[in-house]
Image (cartoon, rainbow, N blue to C red):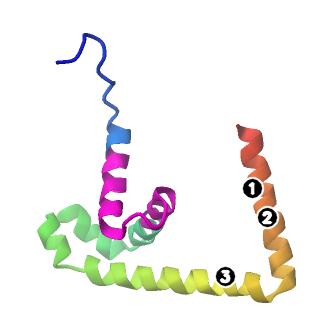
């Protein structure tokens, strides 16, 4: 039994986020940080949200039905697309000095804006 007033407030958003992180940790282990895994999952989910056919199934059918529909294959397609996109972008940064310089300046600007927002 806990003392009166010692319970932490129930935050549904934090609980949902923690459930996602726990699931990602179960799937991928601890080699990659939680933040990176979460951004990866959010990126793939965002790509799938843009797929009207997948979203129609998600909105109209049960989890079991969705898992037998378009989602599993479209998920793989979006994962491959993501890999290809990141590889293309990464290779541009690694191989083209002008892109590397411009990207570094863009990242610096983003870091400064984030610093100033704190």
Cα separation between marks 3 and 2? 14 Å
Mark sitting earlier along the chain (3/2): 3
**Residue that mark 3 sits on:** 89
**Mark 2 crowdedness (10 Å alpha carbons): few <14, some 14-19, many ≥20:** few
Q: Secondary structure at mark 3?
A: helix
Classify mark 2: helix, strand or loop: helix
Res 102 → quadrant: bottom right
What secondary structure prevails in the magenta region?
helix
Residue 89 position, x and y percent, is 66, 82
User: Magenta includes 56?
Assistant: no
**Which is more toward the observer, 65 or 39?**
39
- Residue drawn at (29%, 63%), measured in percent from left and top? 26
Q: Please give left or right for residue 36 compared with residue 63 in the image.
A: right
Rendered position, 95 above or below 31: below
C-alpha separation, residue under disc 3 versus residue under disc 1: 18 Å
The earlier-in-sequence mark between 3 and 1 is 3
Which residue is rendered at x = 30% and y = 50% of the image?
19
- Above or below, 108 against 57 in this view is above
Is 26 displayed left or right of 94 in the figure? left
Looking at the image, residue 28 sits to the left or right of residue 42; the answer is left
**Label ID, residue 106:** 2
Tell me which residue sits at (81%, 68%) in the image: 104
Q: Quadrant of the N terminus?
A: top left
């Amino acid at each position: 039994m806990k003392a009166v007033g010692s319970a932490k407030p129930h935050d549904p958003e934090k609980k949902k986020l923690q459930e996602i992180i726990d699931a990602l940790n179960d799937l991928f282990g601890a080699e990659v940080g939680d933040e990176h895994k979460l951004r990866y999952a959010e990126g793939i989910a965002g790509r799938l949200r843009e797929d009207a056919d997948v979203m129609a199934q998600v909105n109209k059918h049960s989890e079991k039905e969705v898992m037998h529909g378009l989602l599993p294959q479209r998920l793989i397609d979006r994962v491959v697309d993501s890999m290809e996109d990141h590889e293309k972008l990464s290779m541009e940064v690694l191989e083209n000095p002008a892109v590397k310089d411009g990207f570094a300046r863009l990242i610096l600007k983003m870091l400064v804006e984030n610093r100033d927002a704190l």
